[in-house]
């Protein structure tokens, strides 16, 4: 049963990870404008953030949200405001050149990218509800922490590997060149999408 639980959670999480959301938008933009290394750091941050939400769900946070709805509301509003702030920054810097044509503007450091990835993931408390629902359906109540640790490890790497793939694709020269030619419009478009997702997180 533990093997079934691990595989089932991994598949459910993979489907959730590849669906477009704030992390996907941020990953594409970072890879295209700053290159693979910052986007890879972002990917690891997303993985850590997903694992933290999964751990919180295993520890009963989803149940706590049901008992204390105001706590969930506060986290949603705070997370939505953070995503709106990121969207505002995209709009604000939309007309700035790509880093490779402005060498005095260095790409984001790896640790900074990891930190941004973690904070972006934690800005949306809905994964705790998602993982809570998945765990109730797939993880046996008597599962030991060895099984739970494997589940958390899988969640960390499924999330990270998916966004590493995204980072690699959009950091290649051809996608970066296309992005560079339309950066102003693309940044505003993705900023608008990220802002809409922020509103959805806060009010959804």
Image: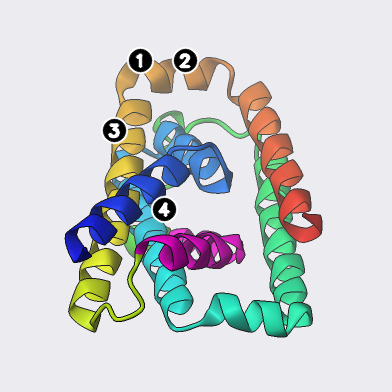
Picture disc at residue 178: 2
Alpha carbon of mark 1 to alpha carbon of mark 4: how far?
Answer: 21 Å
Q: Earlier in the sequence, mark 2 or mark 4?
A: 4
Residue hosting label 3: 168
Q: CA distance from mark 2 to mark 1?
A: 6 Å
For the residue pair 61 and 91, the one nearer the viewer reads as: 61
The answer to the question of whether label 2 and label 1 lie on touching residues, with beta carbons closer than 8 A, is yes
Marks 1 and 4, the one that precedes in the sequence? 4
Mark 4 → mark 3, Cα distance in angstroms: 16 Å
What's the residue at 30%, 60% (across, down)? 156
Q: Is residue 109 left or right of residue 196?
A: left
Q: Secondary structure at mark 3?
A: helix
On-image quarter of the N terminus: bottom left
**Within-10-Å neighbours for mark 2: few <14, some 14–19, many 20+:** few
Q: Magenta stretch?
A: 115-138
Q: Is residue 135 above or below residue 169?
A: below
Asked whether disc 2 touches disc 3, contact meaning CB atoms under 8 Å apart, the reply is no
Whether residue 95 is visible here, answered yes or no, is no
Which label sits in the foreground, 3 or 1?
3
Vertical comparison of 162 with 69: above or below: above
Whole-percent x, y for residue 34 in the image: 41, 40
Residue 41 seen in the figure: yes
Q: CA distance from mark 2 to mark 3?
A: 15 Å
- Lower position in the chain sequence, tag 3 or tag 1: 3
Q: Which residue is drawn at the image coordinates 57% and 75% (left, top)?
A: 62
Secondary structure type for disc 4: loop
Q: Which mark is residue 108?
A: 4
Callout 1: helix, strand or loop?
Answer: helix
């Amino acid at each position: 049963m533990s093997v079934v639980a691990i595989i089932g959670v991994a598949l459910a999480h993979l489907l959730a990870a590849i669906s477009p959301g704030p992390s996907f938008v941020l990953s594409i933009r970072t890879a295209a404008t700053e290159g693979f290394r910052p986007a890879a750091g972002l990917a690891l941050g997303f993985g850590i953030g997903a694992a933290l939400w999964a751990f919180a769900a295993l520890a009963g946070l989803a149940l706590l949200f049901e008992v204390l709805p105001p706590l969930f509301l506060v986290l949603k509003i705070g997370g939505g405001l953070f995503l709106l702030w990121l969207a505002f920054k995209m709009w604000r810097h939309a007309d700035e050149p790509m880093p490779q044509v402005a060498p005095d503007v260095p790409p984001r450091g790896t640790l900074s990218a990891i930190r941004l990835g973690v904070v972006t993931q934690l800005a949306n408390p809905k994964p705790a509800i998602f993982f809570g629902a998945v765990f109730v359906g797939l993880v046996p109540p008597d599962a030991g922490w060895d099984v739970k640790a494997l589940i958390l490890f899988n969640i960390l790497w499924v999330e990270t590997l998916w966004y590493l793939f995204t980072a690699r694709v959009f950091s290649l020269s051809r996608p970066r060149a296309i992005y560079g030619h339309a950066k102003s419009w693309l940044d505003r478009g993705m900023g608008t999408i990220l802002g809409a997702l922020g509103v959805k997180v806060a009010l959804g």
